[in-house]
Amino acid sequence: DQLSHEDKKKVRVVYAGTIGKMQGIDILVKAAKILEKNSNILFYIIGDGSSKNRIVDLCCSLKCANVKILDSVSADYAPFLYRFASINYIPLVHGAVKTCLPSKTADCFASHRPLIVQIDEDSLFAKQLRNFKGVAVIEPSNEEKLAETILTFSSKYGVESEPLLDTWPQGSGDDYCRVLEETYKESFNHVKK
């Protein structure tokens, strides 16, 4: 109900998932504020978590009319949200990639929509993600770079981006599984030290 037909005429930047300390969603809100004069871009933050009230308060204090915050949806509905997006967004705060990986990455890839991932750029996960078409990896805590990347993607891919059917290199899901395996090995090695 809250995904209006009128919204489909705009570039839709979608974050769907946990709204907690590890995600740093405040950076997305600050990027939305930077882009508020661009009336063709709309931000969706969909989910629940320990930081949701703080994010709602931040949106109110910054007067972000271009941000819609919605409650979480069932896992069955998540693939629809990722396909509804013009641009999907996955963030992790500095250092978080050493102990966790966003499980929604595979679903975002399956949507064949452009993806912005905000994680430590020197991580193996970031290095592997750069091999995929339609994916931008940027440092966490940088709302200016996030806003710039959203503008670049919105002009490159548009409102109704064509599915990026060649997002996956040869091997399809197998390559993503390899990325996860290599990244988890890096994480485990970090924990052992």
Image: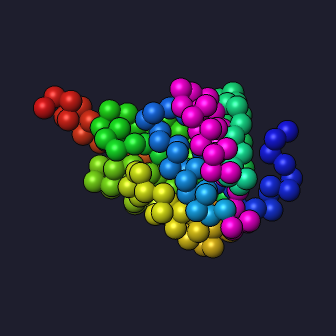
Q: Quadrant of residue 151?
A: bottom right
Residue 158 position in % (x across, y down): 68, 68
Which residue corresponds to the image point at 86% horizontal and 56% vertical from the top-left? 6
* Image vertical order of residue 33 relative to residue 123, above or below: below
Q: Residue furthest front?
A: 61
Which residue corresponds to the image point at 34% horizontal and 44% vertical from the top-left? 94
* Image vertical order of residue 85 relative to residue 136, above or below: above
Magenta stretch: residue 96 in it? no
Q: Quadrant of residue 166?
A: bottom right
What are the residue bounds of the magenta stretch?
37-63
Which image quarter is the C terminus in?
top left
Which image quarter is the N terminus in?
top right
Which residue corresponds to the image point at 41% horizontal and 51% vertical from the top-left? 141
Work out whether residue 138 can be spotted.
yes
Magenta stretch: residue 60 in it? yes
- How many marks the image carries: the answer is 0
Which residue corresponds to the image point at 68% horizontal and 51% vertical from the top-left? 63
Residue 188 position in % (x across, y down): 24, 31
The foreground one among 98 and 76 is 98
Residue 97 position in % (x across, y down): 35, 40
Q: Quadrant of residue 190?
A: top left
The foreground one among 100 and 22 is 22
* Image vertical order of residue 81 relative to residue 53, above or below: below
Q: Is 177 on the left-hand or right-hand side of 193?
A: right
Q: Residue furthest bottom?
A: 155
Work out whether residue 82 can be spotted.
no
Q: Is 27 on the left-hand or right-hand side of 83?
A: left
Residue 118 position in % (x across, y down): 44, 51
Looking at the picture, the colour scheme in use is: rainbow
